[in-house]
Image (cartoon, helix red, strand yellow):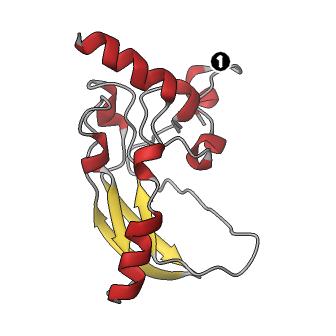
């Protein structure tokens, strides 16, 4: 994690932020950064506690700032139960909250209209904005 990059044991950009529920953010308290080595394979492994049904995965790329958004992933491979379910490029984040939701990658595992309607009905991505950051950006816009 970022502590290995910066040498700072108090760096807040830790792996637990991947699933902290605040996704549309530029706040260090809610992003994750890992060391990058050219040519090496970099992995994130998420294990679910119980058997689950997934209909969609939404991937938010690194979005700290416009300059630092280039630190995000470009090409990813996603496996489910050791089987590939997605291989390809994902969008670079904009480096600000405005436009970040449009840059999140939605990987759907169903074309069933009933399932897609349920996803839309229960989709929380608009609620995943850090309240502190949203108010900061609103103030900056005025």
Residue at image coords 42%, 83%: 115
Q: Is residue 109 visible?
A: no
| Left or right: 53 as drawn, with respect to 85 | right
In the rendered image, the vertical position of residue 100 relative to residue 130, given as above or below:
below
Residue 29 visible in the snapshot: yes
Residue 23, image x, y percentages:
47, 43
| Residue where numbered disc 1 is placed | 8
Residue at the spot 25% in from the left edge and 49% down from the top edge: 102
Quadrant assignment for the N terminus: top right
Q: Residue furthest bottom?
A: 112
Q: Identify the residue at the far front of this view.
A: 121
Under circle 1, the secondary element is loop
Number of callouts: 1
Which quadrant of the structure image shows residue 17? top right
- In the figure, 128 relative to 87: above or below? above
Which residue is at the front of the view, 1 or 53? 53
Whole-percent x, y for residue 135 in the image:
41, 19
Horizontal and vertical percent position of residue 142: 23, 10
Using the rendered view, name the quadrant where residue 129 is placed: top left
**Residue located 37% across and 77% down the image:** 117
Q: Residues within 10 Å of mark 1 (few under 14, many from 20)?
A: few
Tell me where residue 96 appears, x and y as whole percent. Answer: 30, 28
- Please say if 19 is above or below 10: below
Q: Which quarter of the picture shows residue 107?
A: bottom left
Q: Which residue is nearer to you in this view: 14 or 34?
A: 14
In the image, residue 79 above or below residue 23 = below
- In the visual, does 19 lie left or right of 72? right
């Amino acid at each position: 994690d970022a502590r290995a990059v910066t040498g700072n044991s108090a760096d807040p950009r830790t792996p637990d932020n991947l699933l902290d529920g605040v996704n549309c953010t530029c706040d260090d308290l809610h992003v994750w950064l890992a060391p990058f080595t050219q040519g090496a394979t970099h992995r994130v492994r998420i294990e679910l506690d119980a058997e689950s049904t997934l209909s969609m995965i939404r991937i938010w790329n690194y979005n700290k700032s416009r300059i630092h958004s280039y630190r995000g992933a470009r090409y990813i491979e996603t496996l489910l139960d050791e089987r590939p379910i997605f291989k390809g490029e994902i969008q670079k984040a904009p480096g600000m909250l405005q436009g970040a939701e449009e840059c999140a990658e939605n990987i759907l595992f169903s074309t069933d209209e009933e399932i897609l309607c349920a996803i839309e009905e229960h989709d929380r991505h608009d609620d995943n904005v850090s309240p502190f950051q949203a108010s900061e950006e609103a103030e900056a816009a005025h």
